[in-house]
């Protein structure tokens, strides 16, 4: 693929969708799709490192997913626990920092312990970043942020008269992450499903028909090929963007 490094997004966020349908299509139980999806995580992370894409965020389990059958929820929690136990060594080897965003305190105890262990084991790394959104929802994130901000006001640490987006952003789960440049959803669905809605205000969107277990290197490169043709204007005109680009090139 002929894609200049300057055209790569700094932060890719992916809604990993289609595991169950992938399994059904192959006549397998749904959990087999989730297992195969874990393999896809490894491949996509590896490709991102090769392409020098430093931030990868994956939507693993939403707050709404608790409404699924209990048997599937239990299997997903076991799979997440196993994934962390197995992959933490690989993350350390690749020097990838793991973050987990969402209401982690509501997860099963064994999963919480494994999350804590993995976070601590990779905390010293800062070049590569993998963030898993687990028991996550953008609306609950905002609720939690507002509660924390209100408590800070009560303690005299914040002045509501000086409130800004930057202030509120510092109370989000993603306070230490750059906003995503590129959001990908697999399986053909075309909605955000309560994922990073505030952070994605100016993100480019890409909807792939490929189910997540089949979202391999070729599928990711195809998405990036589409991204390179986007013009990100942030409210400006195309002419203004061109002028800014020319100015930057003349300075360098």
Image (cartoon, rainbow, N blue to C red):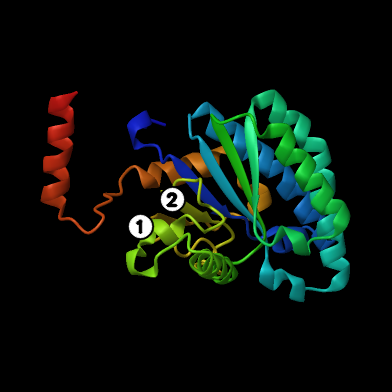
- Name the N-terminal-most of marks 2 and 1: 2
The residue closer to the viewer here, 128 or 188, is 128
Q: Kindly indicate the quadrant of the structure image that contains residue 63.
A: bottom right
Is any part of residue 80 visible from this angle?
A: yes
Asked if the residue at tag 1 contacts the one at tag 2, i.e. Cβ–Cβ closer than 8 Å, the answer is yes
Q: How far apart are the alpha carbons under marks 2 and 1?
A: 9 Å
Whole-percent x and y of residue 105?
75, 60
Where residue 202 is drawn, which disc sits there? Answer: 1
The residue closer to the viewer here, 108 or 32, is 108
Is any part of residue 200 visible from this angle?
A: no
Where residue 114 is drawn, which disc sits there? Answer: none
The residue closer to the viewer here, 165 or 226, is 165
Q: Which residue is mark 2?
A: 179
Task: Decide: few, some or many residues near mark 2? Use Cα within 10 Å; few <14, some 14-19, many ≥20.
Answer: many
The residue at the far bottom in this view is 67
Taking 47 as reference, is 230 above or below it? below
Taking 40 as reference, is 30 above or below it? below
- The residue under the point 76% across, 36% down is 87
Q: Would residue 49 be found to the left or right of residue 5 on screen?
A: right
The residue closer to the viewer here, 138 or 42, is 138
Secondary element under disc 2, as helix, strand or loop, is loop
Q: Would residue 35 be found to the left or right of residue 190 on screen?
A: right
- The quadrant of the rendering that contains the N terminus is top left
Whole-percent x and y of residue 184?
50, 54
Whole-percent x and y of residue 32?
82, 54
- The residue under the point 15% across, 55% down is 237
Whole-percent x and y of residue 213?
68, 50
């Amino acid at each position: 693929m002929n894609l200049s490094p300057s055209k790569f997004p700094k932060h890719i966020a992916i809604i990993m969708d289609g595991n169950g349908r992938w399994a059904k299509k192959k006549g397998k139980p749904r959990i087999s799709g989730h297992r195969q999806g874990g393999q896809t995580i490894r491949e996509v992370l590896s490709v991102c490192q090769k392409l020098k894409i430093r931030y990868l965020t994956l939507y693993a389990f939403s707050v709404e997913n608790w409404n699924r059958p209990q048997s599937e929820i239990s299997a997903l929690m076991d799979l997440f626990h196993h994934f962390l136990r197995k992959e933490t060594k690989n993350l350390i080897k690749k020097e990838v920092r793991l973050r987990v965003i969402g209401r982690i305190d509501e997860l099963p105890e064994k999963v919480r312990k494994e999350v804590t262990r993995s976070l601590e084991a990779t905390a010293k790394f800062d070049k590569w970043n993998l963030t898993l959104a687990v028991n996550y929802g953008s609306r609950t994130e905002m609720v939690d942020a507002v509660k924390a901000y209100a408590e800070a006001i009560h303690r005299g640490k914040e002045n509501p008269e000086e409130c800004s987006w930057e202030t509120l952003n510092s109370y989000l789960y993603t306070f230490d992450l750059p906003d995503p440049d590129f959001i990908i959803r697999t399986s053909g669905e075309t909605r955000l499903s309560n994922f990073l809605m505030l952070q994605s205000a100016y993100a480019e969107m890409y909807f792939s028909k490929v189910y997540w277990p089949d979202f391999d290197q070729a599928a990711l490169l195809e998405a990036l090929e589409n991204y390179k043709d986007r013009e990100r204007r942030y409210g400006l005109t195309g002419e203004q963007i061109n002028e800014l680009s020319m100015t930057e090139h003349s300075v360098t």
